[in-house]
Amino acid sequence: MSFDIALIVESIPEMLGGIGLTFQLLFLSGALGLVLAVVLLLMRISGRWYLAVPTMVYIYVFRGTPILVQIFIIYYGLPQLEFVRESVFWPILREPFGCAIVALTLNTGAYVSEILRGGVLGVDRGLKEAGAALGLSIRQRFVYITAPIAIRLALPAYSNDVISLMKSTALASTITLLDMMGIARTIVAETYAPYEVFLSLMVIYLILTWIIQRTFGLIERRLSRHIRSEV
Amino acid sequence: MEAISGWWDDFFWGSVVILQIFVVALIMTVLFGLIGAAAKLSNNRVAKSIAGAYTVVFRGTPEILVLLLIYFGSAVTLTQIAQAFDPEIKFMDLPPFWAGSLAIALIVGSYATETFRGAFLGVEPGQVEAARALGLSNFQTFVYVRIPAMWRLALPPFGNHMLSLIKDTALISIIGTQETLFVAEQAIGTTGKPFTMYILVGLIYLGFSTVITLAVMVLEKYANRHLEVGR
């Protein structure tokens, strides 16, 4: 069992060539997923059954099936349907990158919406009642009282979901995309040196995870600065 | 629908494989989780840091990367060992079923480690002291007092771990087990109906997720039966 140091030195920059794609997948589907999550949340808590029930079904379906299957349905499955091929979305759904973004967005949106709902449900009722007593409208209470507190409550769980999303971007390699994971798989197929290549890639992903955790840790500290005890 | 008709039995046996992987991986997950939690709560610095590294690494890297590392890594190592005895052997691997079950159990086990650790810490110290006072040994205290008190606390998050586990089984098709995604690929090869086949796979997984969710609800009710208010 020998460890090929030269191969590691060679393959790390090669894999880092895919980090741009990993970031694109992460940021684009992360941002779109957040928008989707907020829309789903508002529908879910709207109190109107014709909005809430479809949202619940959506969340149930997307959280109850593997993301790999969702990616395959969108990338391999949708082209079977003629109306998809004739729709305006076809330029997006024809490309593996577009399919990966759509799949990751739909998936993370379902999870994040549940996280946000947890935050909203965690807001103290007394605060909302106080807002009502002060004469704020329902919309004002949501924007000025519920939302800021809910965001703070949901943040730790949300940072975990961003890490999950980052890990899920590696699945884009299953639909021919050459993100870091895709490049690593190509190198292993050529050199047959899984330890060197995959362990190096693990370190890269661990660093990304650490950066995400640090960033959210700093945001959390900033958002809860008023409740931090004086040192 | 008629496209599926010839494939029902293949999908059925694919689902059986999913179930087998799930059961095997679940047992390993509980083991890894308990060992990890015990190590994290022990006073042994080496055990603590190994368990700490385990949870950081397996929670911070993509599932597909862990899976490929374990499958191809073990294949390289096994082939080398086999060749030391018999140079004729060209290739030897862990069967994908076992390599895959091990990989997803290691991943979900790292999450279970944190869950179990928290749950053990949540057991009231008074109960453990009472067990000591009654003369129970450490082992007896663990089996009769700590475990029954902790699993009630661990159950809700552990239900989520089981859902992750069933969904992660889909990844194992990448290294080639005969589960439903693999069956779908074969069915698509002859019928040319990817959407139909992958939707069916999604429905199978949705069924599994639903059963697990319901089972966890029943278990939670059972675990909390002593807290129910009598009528």
Image (tube, coloured by chain):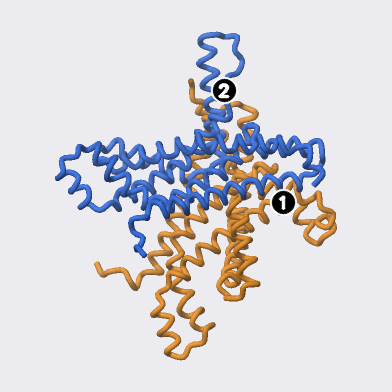
For numbered disc 1, what is the local secondary structure?
helix
Tag 2: amino acid: Asp
Question: Residue A136, image x and y in percent?
Answer: 48, 88
Of residues A129 and B205, the one drawn nearer to the viewer in this rendering? B205
The color chain A is rendered in: orange
Q: Residues within 10 Å of mark 2 (few under 14, many from 20)?
A: some
Q: Residue at x 58, y 72 (%)?
A: A42
Hey, which quadrant is residue B21 in on the image? Answer: top right
Report whether mark 1 lies on the same chain as mark 2. Answer: no
Measuring from the top left, give residue B31's x and y in whole percent: 40, 36
Crowd around label 1: few <14 · some 14–19 · many ≥20 (10 Å) = many
Residue A200 can be seen, yes or no: no
Colour of chain B, in one word, is blue
The residue indicated by pointer 2 is: B93
Amino acid type shown at disc 1: Ile
Q: Quadrant of residue B96?
A: top right
Total residue callouts: 2
Residue beneath the point at 27% across and 45% down: B145
Can you say which quadrant of the picture contains the C terminus of chain A? bottom left
Q: Which residue is mark 1?
A: A74
Q: Residue at x 81, y 52 (%)?
A: A81
Q: Is residue A29 left or right of residue B194?
A: left
Q: SS class of the residue under badge 2? A: loop
